[in-house]
Amino acid sequence: MVDEYRRYYRDWGFDLSEVQQRVTVWQGENDTGLPMSHARRLTADLPNGDLRIVPATAHALPLVIAEDILGDLAP
């Protein structure tokens, strides 16, 4: 978790507002490891960001909805 916070708060080397591709941010509704405010901020900073909140799911949401995420990546 510490490594995630370090990556999140340091300079990524580019401005999110320059990312023109569609980016889906997946967030578990019950995730206490990565607060909803982070997902909302990240999505707001992306011109084509799409926040998908997964009900009744926490930080391990890729294990729960892997097919949905992969389907989104390669429709």
Image (cartoon, grey):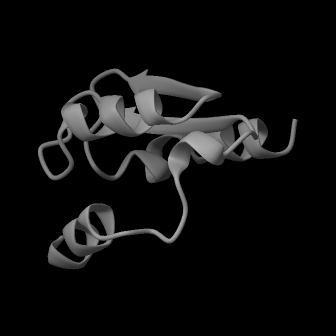
Instruction: Please tell me in which quadrant of the rendered image residue 73 appears.
Output: top right
Instruction: Please tell me in which quadrant of the rendered image residue 27 appears.
Output: top left
Q: Residue furthest right?
A: 75
The residue depicted at 34 percent of the width and 52 percent of the height is 60
The residue depicted at 28 percent of the width and 49 percent of the height is 59
Q: Is residue 30 left or right of residue 61?
A: left
- Look at the picture and state if 5 lies above or below 17: below
Instruction: Please tell me in which quadrant of the rendered image residue 74 appears.
Output: top right
Residue 63: image x %, image y %? 46, 53
Residue 45: image x %, image y %? 45, 35
Residue nearer the viewer, 8 or 58:
8
Residue nearer the viewer, 41 or 73:
41
Residue nearer the viewer, 54 or 4:
4
The residue depicted at 40 percent of the width and 45 percent of the height is 61
Residue 44: image x %, image y %? 43, 27
The residue depicted at 72 percent of the width and 34 percent of the height is 22
Q: In this view, does 14 lie to the left or right of 1?
A: right
Q: In which quarter of the image is the N terminus?
A: bottom left
Residue 26: image x %, image y %? 47, 37
Q: Which residue lies furthest to the bottom in this view?
A: 3
- Look at the picture and state if 73 lies above or below 54: below
Q: In this view, does 42 lie to the left or right of 16?
A: left
Q: Quadrant of the C terminus?
A: top right
